[in-house]
Amino acid sequence: MCNVTNTNLCDRTTGSCTCKKGWTGIFCNEDIDDCITTANICPALSTCDNKPGEYSCDCNAGYLKNAFGQCQECQQGRFGTDCSQSCLCDMAHTAECKTNNGSCICELGWTGRTCNEDVKECDNVTTCSAYSTCIEAIGSYECICNIGSKRSLLGNKCLACSDNTYGDRCSLPCPCKTDNTLTPTQSCDHVSGSCLCTAFWKGNTCEEDIDECNADVCADSNAFCHNTLLGYKCFCKKGFVLHETRGLCENVSKLSEGQEALQLQITLNIPDNDINLSVESTFAVYAEKVVSSLRQYWSRFIKGFTVVVNTLRTGSLHVDYTLYYVPSTNTSKAVSNAFVEMVNGIDLEFDGKTVSAVSDGLANSSVVCDVYQVAIGDCGFSMACVVEKGIAKCVQNPMVSTDSIRLIVGVTVSIGLLLLLGIIIAVYALNKRKARTAMKIKQKEAFNNRALQHGDQKVLKLPGVESRRNYGAPDASRYRTWRSLALGLSGSYPNEHDRSATSFKLPRLAQNQKRTNSFN
């Protein structure tokens, strides 16, 4: 049985149902989904909405169907289904009001639900570049270059002043002496323009030299301070020289300990330019330059030496100096060879320039030979030191003939033989004299012994005599003489018994014996 509502016609004979549009089925009671069965049934930007027996095409939110059945976007300020709602955005600061939901897209510098709040860009420290300041504005901000900087060529940042400029937009030039500043390409502060001097200069434009010598900068009492344009320098006083390892000034006299000291002279061909060498600092500056030049020269020949400048005189530059070195055969030979070069003239590096120099004092070659003979010893008799082709050596002395040499050698040998013979004779005579003396001593001892003993009878030793003559020693009897014995007879005795107990017999002198032999 047909659904009357959904059926256009019911066949009276068969009873079949003819369904209305949008319906189907035997009885026209089944809805046809046109949104599915029919492709592209709705226009763009719309949605197909199936309904019982029919469908509709509804424009999406933010769109409105026009007279041609097409969906078009809502006008600005309207949004929602069929553009039925008004936007709430602050349209003065809103870039876009979304037509589908009415949300606000704010312009740059604004924020908030309705774009009515100003963004605080300057709260972010990275908003502006270095050397600039952030300034807030309504809905925006501005980066202003600070004094002492300027905007880059691209305009996106600020740069500090350069090329010796300073101030607002780097419009002012620095007033400094650029060579006396820390950075010659930017000699002043880029903000204030004050000059940035090195440690050796001061003043508004770095034009005033600082005298460091006003302070006690030289710790050595044997040194003095010399102010320079680039600071200061400590020089040893006259009579002192800088020790290479300790760095202190020590007395020149210490250099002569264990070293050879040669007093030398050299003249450097340089203009004096009215220099005053009587000023201590001026003398020290030139002496240092001379020492540097001479060390460079002498180092070609020897090692471990010291050069000390004693005096300087103008008119070119006349130098009296002392060369200290440890003497040895090789060193002394090298020194003598160096002298030969100096006699002929040499070139020295002095104060960055090459100058000619000569040692006139060595022209007679005597100093050269003196040093050479220190090395090898004296040339010897009939030999002489000469300088030939720049080398010192010993050669036969032409002033001494061969015959003279033979004569001198002969005389020297003869004198030597006579001296040797005299020494032999003197030794022989001395030995003979010693033998005679020994014989006399033996004879005296024998004679004295005979005086003390005659035959088997012994002579009594007299205490009185011994005490008076200090003959109390055990061997005192050997020194008795006839005279002492005779004198002893008069000695005192304790009693007469002792006196008569012993008889004294005096030995008789031999007839042929002289009396003088009995006494010392």
Image: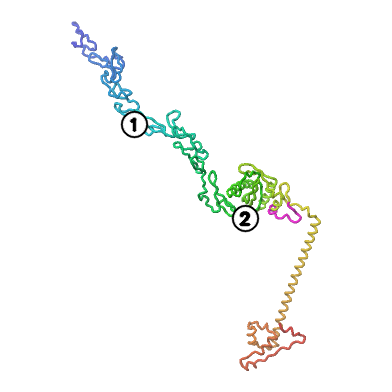
Quadrant containing the N terminus is: top left
SS state under label 1: loop
Residue 444, disc? none
In terms of secondary structure, where does tag 2 sit?
helix
**44 sits to left or right of 313:** left
The answer to whether one can see residue 337 in this image is no
Q: Amino acid at mark 2?
A: Ser
Looking at this view, name the residue that lies furthest to the right. 403
Using the image, tell me which numbered label, if any, was put on residue 256: 2
Across and down, in percent, residue 348 comes to: 64, 44
Position of residue 253 relative to residue 512, above or below, is above
Give the distance between the C-alpha atoms of the residues marked 2 and 1, in whole angstroms: 84 Å
Q: What kind of residue is marked 1?
A: Lys
Give the residue at x 73% y 46%.
389
Who comes first in sequence, dot 2 or dot 1?
Answer: 1
Q: Which residues are magenta?
A: 371-385
Q: Alpha-carbon neighbours of circle 2 within 10 Å: few (<14), some, or many (≥20)?
A: few
Q: Residue 393: give x, y in percent of width and height.
A: 72, 51
Of the two numbered discs 2 and 1 in the rendering, the one whose residue sits closer to the viewer = 1
* Residue 282 within the segment the image draws in magenta: no
Residue hosting label 1: 120
Tell me if residue 388 comes above or below residue 12 in the rendering: below
Q: Quadrant of residue 355?
A: top right
